Amino acid sequence: MLLFLFNVFLLILEVSTLVINCVSILCDQVLKLFRDKPHKDVANKIILITGAGSGVGREMAIRFAKMNAILVLWDIERDLVTETANIIRRSGGIAHAMTVDVSDENKVEKSADHVKEEIGDVYMLINNAGVCPCLPFKDLTYKQIRRTFDVNCLSHFWTTKQFLPSMINNERGHIVAISSSAGIMGSAYFTAYGASKYGVVGLMASLDRELAELEKRDFIKLTTICPLGISGTRVDIPTRTRFPKILPVMTLEHAVDLIMDAILKEDDMVVIPFTFKFIYFVNRLFPLRMSNLLFEFLDYAVEPHGINAPIGRSHFNDLDYRNKWENQNTINHLSDQINKQYMLVEEEDQDDY
């Protein structure tokens, strides 16, 4: 009887501790809305970014270089990643450009060995490389599906396996995964892309639990970024939005502002922009049909015509940066460039077959 009462007492104590800790976490999340967490210092630390040849990867690399970080830039396209490195070097920064196909685990291992031997231990790994087929499910080829998972999801495994061990040994490090809004909510015509990004979210969540079991979570930070659509990248997908003030298609500069802020504050799960967090909240707590109704009302969706579709009407509607895109000649030029790039991608796919 005494043993039973003692066990009951221990259970009550554990439940009480659990409740107190949960309330503390909730209070901390609320306080985040009213206090500004300081940014961490990345000066002289080695930061490796995949997909650094253009778009979000290039923009992040340039900004980290201004903070005196040492950049290791990986991209499958030699000319683009070299250009990013040259931009950084001309500004007095340090950048090492490497041509790497992150979907190939053997090439990742070989390139990682070179980084560790010639440059040093990576402090921050940013898995940013990605491909984005926007097609009806029936039109997706087997190769497109495999390629999407290889680049968007499996590459995170290959790079993390190479650089996480040294982070654990050094008891310091930071892994950043660029996922997507499609990785936390379903989206039509994004079946392969969304599924691959869901995999990234699952990987990071499971890795967080594993680091907790190893008692390394306090030393190694994990950040998962889930943004809505971003314009101004080389993989722009035509997107429509009925209420751009609520769910805008973010410009590259604005999106990277939010991403950099989250990384430097060591946030864990990041959903941007802020207005999308409410939709995510509804999606998690209420029946799926309710969030579907809300999304149908807001009418935020990608266009189903694939990579050769015209630029979506809302690509240049971001509130803070709208003036950047008022010149119609700029818009037409960007549209032509993107369509040309997509035609090249299709030709390369045909050659591979």
Image: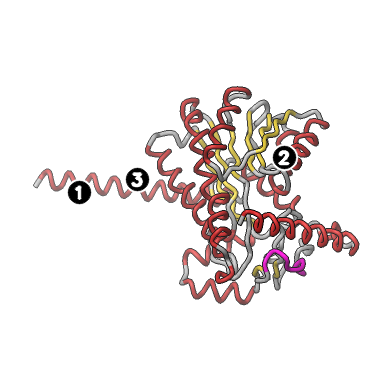
Label 2: state its secondary structure. Answer: helix
- Residue at image x 86%, y 63%? 332
Q: Which is closer to the viewer, label 3 or label 2?
A: 2
Which of the labelled discs sits on residue 8, or is there none? Answer: 1
- Local crowd at mark 3 within 10 Å, few (<14), some, or many (≥20)? few
Query: What is the magenta range?
Result: 306-313
Q: Earlier along the polypeptide chain: callout 1 or callout 3?
A: 1
In the rendered image, residue 49, in percent from the top left (x then y), is placed at 64, 39
Q: Name the residue type under label 3.
A: Thr
Q: Residue 174 falls in which quadrant of the image? A: top right
Could you tell me if residue 264 is visible in this image? no
Q: Is residue 184 above or below residue 25?
A: below
Label 2 sits on residue? 78
Label 3 sits on residue? 17
Q: Main secondary structure of the magenta part?
A: loop
How far apart are the two marked residues, 1 and 3, measured between alpha carbons? 14 Å
Q: Earlier along the polypeptide chain: callout 1 or callout 2?
A: 1
Label 1: state its secondary structure. Answer: helix
Q: Is residue 47 left or right of residue 17?
A: right
Q: Is residue 316 above or below residue 206?
A: below
Could you tell me if residue 2 is visible in this image? yes
Colour convention of the picture: secondary structure
Q: Earlier along the polypeptide chain: callout 3 or callout 2?
A: 3
Q: Name the residue type under label 2.
A: Arg
- Local crowd at mark 2 within 10 Å, few (<14), some, or many (≥20)? some
Label 3: state its secondary structure. Answer: helix
